[in-house]
Amino acid sequence: MRTLVLILWLMIASVSVWADKPNLLFIMVDDLGKEWIGSYGGENIETPNIDKLAADGMSFDNAWCMPQCTPTRVTLLTGQYPFRHGWTNHWDVPRWGAGAHFDPSMNPCFPLVLREAGYKTAAAGKWQIDDFRIEPNAMHEAGFDRWCMWTGYETGNKPSGNRYADPYIATNGESKTHQGKYGPDVYSDFLVDFMREHKDEPMFLYYPMALTHSPYDPTPDVPNPKNKQEAFAAMVHYTDKLLGKLVSELETLGIRDKTYIVFTTDNGTGGVTNKRIGQSVRGAKMRMVEAGTAMPFIVTGPGIKAGSTNDALMDFSDLAPTFADLAGTSMPDKHEIDGKSFAPLLQGKADDSPRNWILSMGGKPAKLRDGRVVPTDSYDERVLRDKRFKVWVNGQGEIEKLYDMQNDPWEKTNLLAVPHETPEQTAAIAKFKSILATFPAEDAAPAYEANPAQPWDRKK
């Protein structure tokens, strides 16, 4: 009898502990700027499910990613800036190899932190910072219980280039072509199945979408687009549709009210143009103008005021400590974390983020030196901003541009080229110089235990 009572008590205690832990669904679209989102003023496009998410939650105006794939993805996983984690430039691991990869044994990685805190963890979509041929368990080592990932283009394996039609996908250690399937459907179906299986447990779902990255292929809903612009719009529509599918499933399972949904994108749009708030916006991927770094960022969940917007500053280094905070844990002390948690803002316990400046940096392919991946430059160009001013910093660490973002949001007038500097401008420059002085004089190189040499490795 005592044993039965003890078991029942432990079960009740366990349920109570899990009840305090919210689910976390993080959706990150690939290559999509604000100009393609209706709620952010995008024109000639309909995104009803994204707009509904904005109406139900909080939209950020000043949420900065890094301007390119790899720097963004490693920054959000680690909570560190590229100058610290070393991936200041893009390195397509499945395609270029050279022993490089994201190594959780040498870097902070927040999915590991969440799994250790009791979360069931899953990922679906695009990873591209490991080669699953060499590291079939890379996703598990990064903190995921289960995964369904496009492998990235594996050099020498032509089918692996397919992320959309007939996708080549790694699912828990096995890679294969899903003949006749549409990749984004496979990834989203996987997450739906995971939700159903673990609806009574705390979950972290990471959905780095394959959409809307090139190639601009047909979707199941628009099989014969007339041109690239129409094809891209169709991909945006399908992105919106899949968001609606996941939100609907959370509602069906009765767990949406205990789930934080974060919707964002990894960098600006690729090679297409659209209008936003009356302005023609050229795709700004790899550029540090606002269209390349200031991403749509929408959150719904417990404590968030519906239909709210704010100008709080945050960048992608803040994601790791924020997710850890929401899960009731923290990032490990053994690593220096640049990000700051804005969980109190989401929970209604604060009116602003803890930030008074944010940073973006990174672009171009990395290079090899003595067989190791290293930054292209010893000090990568970067941008910093506060709520009013933004500075551009060159490779010598010098401020070469200053913009008043309140009065010049499209960055048309470099105030350093205009005479009669104001006291506000002088104070802003001094502030940013003091911040720059805290950064390392040289950017770090990526830390990893090199994978074994392969025939397809890039040599230079």
Image (cartoon, helix red, strand yellow):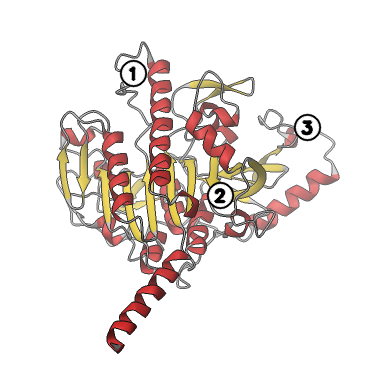
Q: Position of residue 234 (x, y in %)?
A: 39, 22
- Vertical position of residue 402 compared to residue 86: above or below: above
Of tags 1 and 2, the one toward the viewer is 1
Q: Earlier in the sequence, mark 2 or mark 3?
A: 2
What's the CA distance linking mark 2 and mark 3?
29 Å
At mark 3, the secondary structure is loop
Q: Which mark is residue 255?
A: none
Residue type, label 3: Val
The residue furthest front is 1
At mark 1, the secondary structure is loop
Q: Mark 1 touching mark 2, by CB under 8 A?
A: no
Would residue 376 be visible to someone looking at this image? no
Residue type, label 1: Val
Q: Which residue is mark 3?
A: 418
Q: Position of residue 405 (x, y in %)?
A: 71, 37
Q: Which mark is residue 315?
A: 2
- Vertical position of residue 257 compared to residue 335: above or below: above
Q: Residue 279 vs residue 321: left or right? A: right
Please tell me how crowded label 2 is: few (under 14), some (14-19), or many (20+) other residues with Cα within 10 Å.
many
Q: Residue 205 vs residue 294: left or right? A: left
What's the CA distance linking mark 1 and mark 2?
35 Å
At mark 2, the secondary structure is strand
Please tell me how crowded label 3 is: few (under 14), some (14-19), or many (20+) other residues with Cα within 10 Å.
few
